[in-house]
Amino acid sequence: MPEFRIGHRRYPTKQAAGDAVRAVLYGYEVGSTVDRPADHLLLLDLLDLHEEAPDKIGSGVDSFVIAPPLRGPHPGFAVVRTDGTRIDFSYLACLKPPTYRQQVSSAMRAEVEDQVSAYFTARVAAGSLVSDQSGAPLDYGDTHVSYFRGPTFAEIAATFAAAVGGWDAIELNSSADQGIGTFTDRALAERWRSHHAEHAVLGLLSSQENLRRPRA
């Protein structure tokens, strides 16, 4: 049975992934905030898998809370956005197989991971490990590379996809069945890498600053 991924986390089965999410759901009282960092990060990555993720995320995620049951006996999750609004989301909807667009987006991130890593390494070497939002010094292990100063990753990816004929025109290798594929056409991959390098405006944030920005 194929493994299931939530962000960087790998589970042997979809059932195991669901068990990890349910451990968070039932590990808090109804009405309480999900305040353990590892649980918060899991739910952020889980929400990215929702087919309506941009609408659910809205202005950005401030926190997650355990919502009372809408129907039946079981509680659920709700997103508290940075603008103060709140919306429920179904974790079961997030555990559906990824759409082809989601698979391509994951492959796009993998293809430019070295560019993002190189940016972070250069900032460290230059002695400029400070938040580009607050100016505060950053800890090496508590720093995120973010697109907050320019177009989001999703916008950069969507522009490229439109320019090459749409998401379906980007063929992925067979490992994309697990959402971790790469471009089959390596010339197209290089076009994507060049496009990303031209349009990405990267910056550094603390993990908490980055968590509260719109996810893209």
Image (spheres, rainbow, N blue to C red):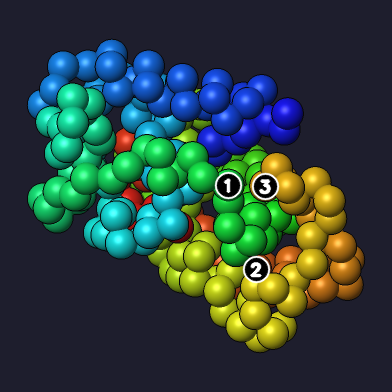
Of the residues shown, which amino acid type is indicated by label 1?
A: Pro
Q: Secondary structure at mark 1?
A: loop
- Local crowd at mark 3 within 10 Å, few (<14), some, or many (≥20)? many
- In the picture of the structure, the residue carrying the numbered disc 3 is 179
| Circle 3 or circle 1, nearest the eye | 1
Q: Earlier in the sequence, mark 3 or mark 1?
A: 1
Q: Earlier in the sequence, mark 3 or mark 2?
A: 3
Q: Nearer the viewer, residue 79 or 137?
A: 79
Of the residues shown, which amino acid type is indicated by label 2?
A: His
Q: Residue at x 58, y 58 (%)?
A: 99
Q: Residue at x 66, y 23 (%)?
A: 12
Q: Secondary structure at mark 3?
A: loop
The image quarter containing residue 35 is: top left
Per the model, the C-alpha gap separating discs 3 and 2 is 20 Å
In the image, which disc is placed on residue 196? 2
Whether residue 139 appears in this view of the structure is no
In the image, which disc is placed on residue 97? 1
